Amino acid sequence: MLRCLLLLLALTPPLAAQQASKLQTGTLKGSVTDPMGSLVVDAKVSLKNARGVTVTANSNSSGVYEFKRLQPGAYELRIVAPGFNIFEQQE
């Protein structure tokens, strides 16, 4: 009976690894520029998903922002920077 159990365990694939691989996430990276094409530093960038959960990031010294480990779905993008109009886009 012990042999049967060991054989069964040896033939069973690791379920945790399969479940983890099904959880796919993505990254969103972009840059904030003004209408003249100049980089905007320290702009507040936020993403809101369909459930209303919001994540935020600030643009760096190169005007770049990045969000990692995003779940698939539609998001609302909002960018706020002093001296500029608020930018909003839904996808």
Image (cartoon, helix red, strand yellow):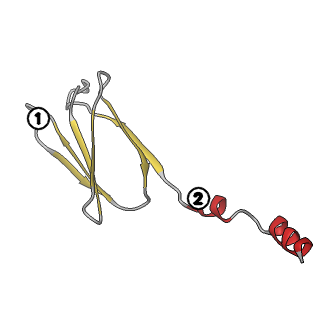
59 to 49, vertically: above or below: above
Whole-percent x and y of residue 32? 27, 33
Whole-percent x and y of residue 60? 30, 26
Looking at the image, the residue that sits furthest to the front is 2
* Amino acid type of the residue that numbered disc 1 sits on in the rendered structure: Phe
Q: Nearer the viewer, residue 68 or 41?
A: 68
* Amino acid type of the residue that numbered disc 2 sits on in the rendered structure: Ala
Looking at the image, the residue that sits furthest to the left is 83
Q: Categorize mark 1 by other alpha carbons within 10 Å: few (<14), some (14-19), many (20+).
A: few
Q: Residue at x 75, y 65 (%)?
A: 13
Q: Nearer the viewer, residue 46 or 38?
A: 46
The residue labelled by disc 1 is: 84
Side (left or right) of 13 relative to 65: right
Dot 2: element: helix
Q: Quadrant of residue 51?
A: bottom left
Whole-percent x and y of residue 2? 88, 72
**Disc 2 from disc 1: Cα separation:** 42 Å
Q: Nearer the viewer, residue 35 or 62?
A: 62
Q: Quadrant of residue 75?
A: bottom left
Please tell me which of labels 2 and 1 falls first in the chain.
2
Whole-percent x and y of residue 56? 26, 44
Q: State the mark number for residue 63.
A: none
Side (left or right) of 63 relative to 29: left
For the C terminus, the image quarter is bottom left
Q: State the mark number for residue 20.
A: 2
